């Protein structure tokens, strides 16, 4: 079974979310904070805290994190869109 360290898993996620920027850090021994940002401006598009993870992960765990971030992106409605919705 192949496993990867947290930094290697973050690299896989950076490749996956490109052209958006992606960075993550562990905020506790078993969770992380992920941030997606616009590479040109550096502006944060979305930040998600409390994502379960580990220092060593199987590829399936990395895929689960990617799917969780994508689900948050799908559910995200920018404030400006809400302003014009009603």
Image (cartoon, rainbow, N blue to C red):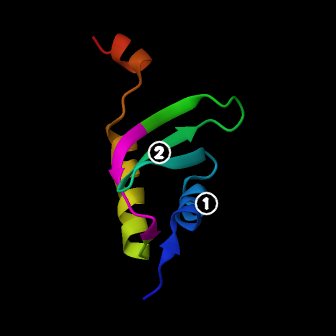
Residue that sits furthest to the right in the current view: 40
Residue 84 in sight here: no
The x, y position of residue 62, in whole percent, is 43, 66
Tell which of 44 and 53 is nearer to you: 53
Left or right side of 69 for 21: right
Q: How crowded is the residue under tag 2: few (<14 C-alpha within 10 Å), some, or many (20+)?
A: many
The label shown at residue 72 is none
Residue 63 in sight here: yes
Q: Residue at x 51, y 74 (%)?
A: 4
What range is drawn magenta here? Answer: 48-56
Which residue carries the number 1 mark?
Answer: 15
In which quadrant is the N terminus drawn? Answer: bottom left
CA distance separating discs 2 and 1: 14 Å
The correct choice, above or below, for 78 with respect to 20 in the image is above
Q: Nearer the viewer, mark 2 or mark 1?
A: 2
- SS state under label 1: helix
The x, y position of residue 35, in whole percent, is 51, 40
Quadrant of residue 79 within the rendered picture:
top left
| In magenta segment, residue 30 | no
Q: Residue at x 41, y 76 (%)?
A: 58
The correct choice, above or below, for 6 with respect to 69 in the image is below
The x, y position of residue 19, in whole percent, is 64, 48
Which residue carries the number 2 mark?
Answer: 34
The x, y position of residue 50, in whole percent, is 33, 44
- SS state under label 2: strand
Quadrant of residue 60 within the rendered picture:
bottom left
The correct choice, above or below, for 25 with respect to 39 in the image is below
């Amino acid at each position: 079974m192949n496993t990867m360290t947290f930094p290697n898993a973050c690299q896989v996620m950076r490749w996956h979310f490109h052209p958006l920027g992606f960075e993550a850090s562990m905020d506790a021994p078993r969770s992380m904070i992920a941030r997606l940002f616009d590479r040109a401006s550096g502006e944060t598009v979305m930040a998600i805290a409390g994502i379960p993870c580990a220092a060593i992960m199987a590829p399936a765990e990395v895929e689960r994190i990617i799917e969780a971030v994508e689900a948050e992106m799908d559910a995200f409605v920018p404030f400006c869109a809400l302003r014009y919705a009603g």
